[in-house]
Image (cartoon, coloured by chain):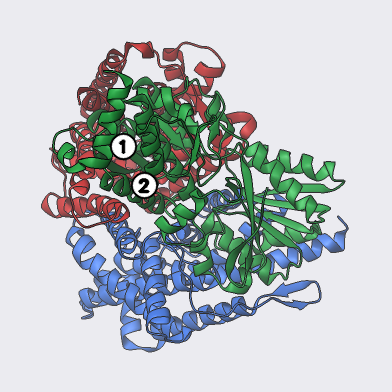
Chain colours: A green, B red, C blue
Amino acid sequence: MTLARRTLLLSTSLLAAPSLVRAQAAPIKLGTLTPLTGAGGPYGPVMAACVRGVVDQVNAAGGVLGKQIELISEDDQTNPEAGVRAARKLIDVDRVSAIMGTWASSVTTAVAPLAWENKVFLATVSGADSITLLPHNGWLVRTQPNTTLQGKKFGEFAVAQGAKRIFVMMPQTPFTQSQFAAMKAAAEAGGGAAELLIYDATKPSLRTEVDQAMRFRPDVIVAGGYTPDTSVLLRDLYRASFSGKVLAFAYAVNQAMLGAIPKEVVEGVMTLAPSPAAGSGGYAKVQALAGTQAPDPYTCQIYDHVNLVLMAMAKGGATTGQAVHDNIRKVSQGSGESVDTALDGLRAIAAGREVNYEGASGPCDFNEIGDVLDVKFRYEQVKAGALTLIRIA
Amino acid sequence: MISYLVFLAVIGGIYALLAQSVTLAWGMAGLVNLGLAGFFGIGAYASAMLVTWGGVPVPVGLVAAVIAGAVAGLVVTGATLRLRDDYLAIVTLGFAEAVRIIASNEIWLTGGTDGISGIPGGFPRDWGLGFHAAWMGTISVLVFCVWFGLRRLSASPWGRALRAIREDQTVAAVAGKPVARMKAEAFAIAAGIAALAGALYGHYGSYIAPELFAPLVTIYVFLAVTTGGNGRPSGAVLGGYLLIAFLEATRFAAGAIPGVTALQAAALREASVGVALILLLHWRPQGILPERNQKAPLV
Amino acid sequence: MPDSFLFGAILQALINGVISGTILAVPAIGFSAIFAVLNYPNFAIGALASVGAYGGLVANTVFGLPLEVSLLAAFATAAVAGIVVEWVAVRPLNQAGALMMAIASLAAAIVLENVIRFFWGNGLRGYDLPMLRDVQFGAIRVGPQQVKNFGISIAAMVALWAFLALTPLGRAMRAVADNADLARLRGVDPVRIAAVAVALGAGLAGMGGMLIGLDTSIDPLTGPRLVLSIFAAAVLGGLGSIPGAVVGALVIGMAEELTVLLIAPSYRSVVGFVVILAVLTVRPAGLFGARA
């Protein structure tokens, strides 16, 4: 088949006669593997729903390469053993081409070898630096920025806020140490000091931990946990009348938290999330899709996963994991037409144009080991109970 | 599909080993070890650290895991054997949590929450399906060996004395049985079996992390043992495989329910595990394969 | 660190521990009360705490009831759920031994947790409650809401004590706990007493879940996150002993807070375990346990 003819066929199937083709071709199978139960439970359901929304839109527009997409959403139970079983089912039974959205670093590390051994593409939001260092040979990309970079940005932002003494409070995670080291370096470069306290994220009160923090006399406290434990920490900081600034990850201080705890507790808290350049439309697309002004950073990332996977398939002219593996960087970066949704991207690819995806979580340009490049950060502050943008840089 | 079934046979075998550990401690000796996940973790870490970082062969790692588990079992029993059953259950639950927290926080020793990846698999991974089949064979043989060993132990004078202790330890003590020593032995062997299961899981899956040893594993194994029958090694083996079959079947069933979100389907799936066990306990409180001789002869 | 500074820090940690221990005591008493009468550890206690917290949430945010009334709703919801668990899952197994009953309660806990998840999702929920800043007394600070929760916990304990000591039903319950056979001979209906004990125990667990939720936020794992501390408190005090559960909860509460100062905050849960191990080595039946 010549390229021109394929393009013609594609455009026909995409635009003209979707229902006709739908009846004939075997569907494309994609899987999400997000935590629906267990400690990651606050995040996974929204992520799965976002992918469902994208898939429905693309299917309604005729699918990819004339095929409809069938989405299978499994639960990793925030546990690597259960996660591996779910991944096996997605790979061996459903025969998915890609798995998207693994959240806990332990689940991602456990699932990654299954993915590359079976030529299934894996897109993850996990933070541990070790993940992209696995011998995955290009079968994995991660949209969560490298944790050292996040730590550095956090530290620099704190210094820019005039902080001299930064106290970092985090649960034990695979990125706690590296992130703190980067924050500390940034703080010390700005003439300040930083200290770390690792807390137990299952406790209903962190009063004594907060007392420890206050004794350091910090002017900035970094709350580095997830939503449930950060809500405990913010309350105890409020009760202790901490008058300095509080910085947190946007995935912790998200819309769900704003709805669940008193306004005054989160007022003034500043958040940081990976972001595309200002003016990029991807973020607005997720706002519409998720029906919220402040979509969770993980939801933005999985939105990017599904869009990239679908466009890479179209670009490669095949719906296999191999096609995604070979073509993802051809649609994620380069000098092509800038698109922020698979709907536009698929149309452009069908018309034979090059595309460069600019996502909701960042420009989605990947280096050779699958880490994102040139990511910007979105700095927001809670004002009158809503997240308001300070700047994107 | 075949690779999926082979994989499930391997995981079922791991659970069958864990279930047999519980049968020995609970079914035969009356000791409830809710710290099972902790021993599973100790074995996984012992072997993974020795083989991945120390470069010893996998079989040496497995033996070391059994020894590490048994020693940990002796340490726990040393402190707790004077306790009543229900106290022991809760203390061991705390033990497992302590193991998990130490594995998470002592990064210099265990690698912390990053876990240990790239654990050697014993067989070449590029065998593909052959790799999984080789592991299915290995684990099936080990499940059989442990099953055979437990049956022999159960029928031996040691096993009979153990059941006598389970039924009434005061009477058994009066009859001259070394109650504390025998309980410690049973608990240590059981801990060793759980550790072996952990080591095997690490080598097969190539990755372990502290989150693997959350209480979820212990809960699943107790469901398996209760299902199969807690007094018989055969019941434990059956329960282990049935558990995995059931957990996976619920995945397909939950996917077929119309009109629920992914989250609701996941909730229904987990709830069905609890409901199934409650129903089964009504239907057969002794499990599918009940213990043959209910009361052990004392002498 | 100067001595007076360290002294102040320890005093503050102890006060924090007394407050968190008192709140922990409420579900721990519930757990111990069920054990005292029915002789099995009810592993659904954490899930029942979550059920109570959500029951109170509905009363507070949907029906707009004040918090004190919502606490009673939390008690009632969890009590009903506890009775259902007892009758459907546990009671049919009372010939199969305490540990079988415990396993059945564990199965019921999984069901309860996921029923909550099915209807409310995993997201955080909060009560309609103003946030108050702590009040400073010299170097020590205390939160008004904590003090209030502390008072409510004490009131619940006094009410329980009055019920057990002063009412015929309460006296019958104690008689069953002391010696079930003897109580039966005296004409106490064991089924009715069991139901009362379960309702009381589960209700207290539910109230405890809501009290902790008032201080934080709630999600389906609110109760399950607490179970280790509840168990540690009850075992430390001696299973089945109500004063023991109170003392155990206070000791665990204070030990956990001191860990933050003296060892490392990430080891809070481990210290509870070490404390129970140390106490049980000396007293195998716990501080107040009669039956070893």
| Nearer to me, B262 or B232 | B262
Decide which of tag 1 and tag 2 comes sooner along the chain. Answer: 1
Q: Which residue is mark 1?
A: A30
Q: Nearer the viewer, residue C113 or B194?
A: C113
Circles 1 and 2: CB distance less than 8 Å? yes
Residue C203 shown left or right of residue A286 in the figure: left
Q: Quadrant of residue B157?
A: top left
Element marked by disc 2: helix
Chain at tag 1: A
Provide residue B41's location: percent of width, then percent of height: 45, 33
Crowd class of label 1 (few under 14; some 14 to 19; many from 20; radius 10 Å): many
Regarding mark 1 in the picture, which secondary structure is present there? strand
Q: Write down the residue under mark 2.
A: A51
Q: Residue at x 31, y 23 (%)?
A: A4
Q: Residue B40: image x %, image y %?
A: 41, 33
Above or below — where is A342 with respect to C221? above
Residue at image position (20%, 67%) is C87
In this rendered view, identify the residue nearer to me: B238 or A222: A222
Q: Which three-letter amino acid code belongs to the residue tagged 1?
A: Leu
Name the residue at 64% across, 30% down.
B108
